[in-house]
Amino acid sequence: MVGSKRLFCFGYGYTAAFFGAAAQQQLGWGLSGTTRDIEKRSALRSRGIDAYVFDHDKPLGDPFAMLDGVTHVLISTPPDQEGDLVARLHGEDILRLPDLEWIGYLSTTSVYGDRDGAWVDETTELRPSSIRGSRRLRAESDWISLCQSRNVPLHIFRMAGVYGPGRSALDSVRAGIARRIFKPGHAFSRIHIEDVIQTLMASILLPKGSTVYNLADDEPAPSHEVIAYACRLLGRDPPPLVPFEDANLAPITHSFYSDSKRIKNDRIKEELGILLKYPDYRAGLEACLKIENEYAARNETPPWVYLNPHEERVLGS
């Protein structure tokens, strides 16, 4: 029975919250998850989510009780220098769950490294060129090693830059922190949160064994074009173009510009039947603005506001 399923999300951040809401509203599933913050735990519990504090020094106190009845597990916590924290502390606990049907791991496209703007797909050699990418690859390997001898579908989702309501170029422009960095030939791939969620939902409903999926829209584009379009939608003048070599970027931002590749998404279309709702950033930003304006017109607090933006930063490059 569909309604008897239970989803447990390690790292109840932006993507997990949208996914959990879809599983609850569309399938009638029970929800559990973790956060690093006690206040956010209370906020999650007030929304009917069985929430627990989990971090490097705070493993689940009673994993067998806390994971009782769980059928699907999503891991969206960031890796560290040793790999994936969940695999290290609770991997065996998860694999011993009697009703486990599916494990999803949210990775990023940084595992492909710099390709000088070339296209990559799921069969492309993995050669990360950043610490971030190397950690993601190690985390992927942790889960593959754990699951290779078990009959549980492990789906690894290599996500490009995830954006959506409350977390897009529109927010950067409104906050006055948007910059238009110009690096010739450089392009980012990205994907709207609704297309992430429909892919995750298709994955759990049509499991095809263990596999890897790239999550990206159809149109990689330089970030300065995205910022310019966000300014246009908001009726603001775009900030000036700044050459990459003159931008004086923070190390984390600089690392994103150091990698350049275009992400192919054929597999999610062919195997999962995905038809992207937002195939490019223009359609995606227009949708973000529409829903944000609707909440503002009703004077309602959007559901994503309570999320801690530092809980999960899955950003492809």
Image (tube, rainbow, N blue to C red):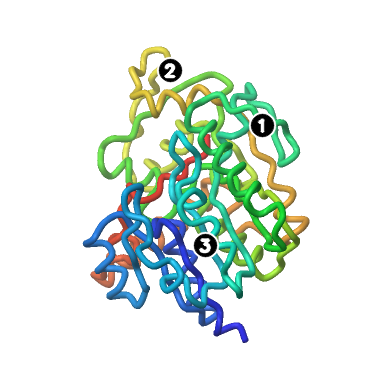
* Secondary-structure class at tag 2: helix
Residue sitting nearer the eye, 185 or 25 = 25
Q: What x and y, as percent, mark residue 23?
A: 52, 73
- Residue 244, numbered circle: 2
User: Please, what is the three-letter code of the amino acid marked with disc 2?
Assistant: Phe
- Pick whichever of labels 3 and 1 is earlier in the sequence: 3
Report the residue that reaches farthest toward the top: 245
Question: What residue is rendered at 25% in x and 42% in y?
Answer: 175
Horizontal side, residue 208 vs residue 44: left or right: right
Picture quarter with the N terminus:
bottom right
CB atoms at circles 3 and 2 under 8 Å apart? no
User: Please, what is the three-letter code of the amino acid marked with disc 3?
Assistant: Asp
Q: Identify whether 44 is placed above or below 53.
A: below
Residue sitting nearer the eye, 267 or 174 = 267
Q: Nearer the viewer, mark 3 or mark 1?
A: 3
- Residue 93, numbered circle: 3
Residue sitting nearer the eye, 68 or 185 = 68
All told, the count of numbered labels is: 3
- Residue 231, numbered circle: none
Q: What x and y, as percent, mark residue 172?
A: 32, 41
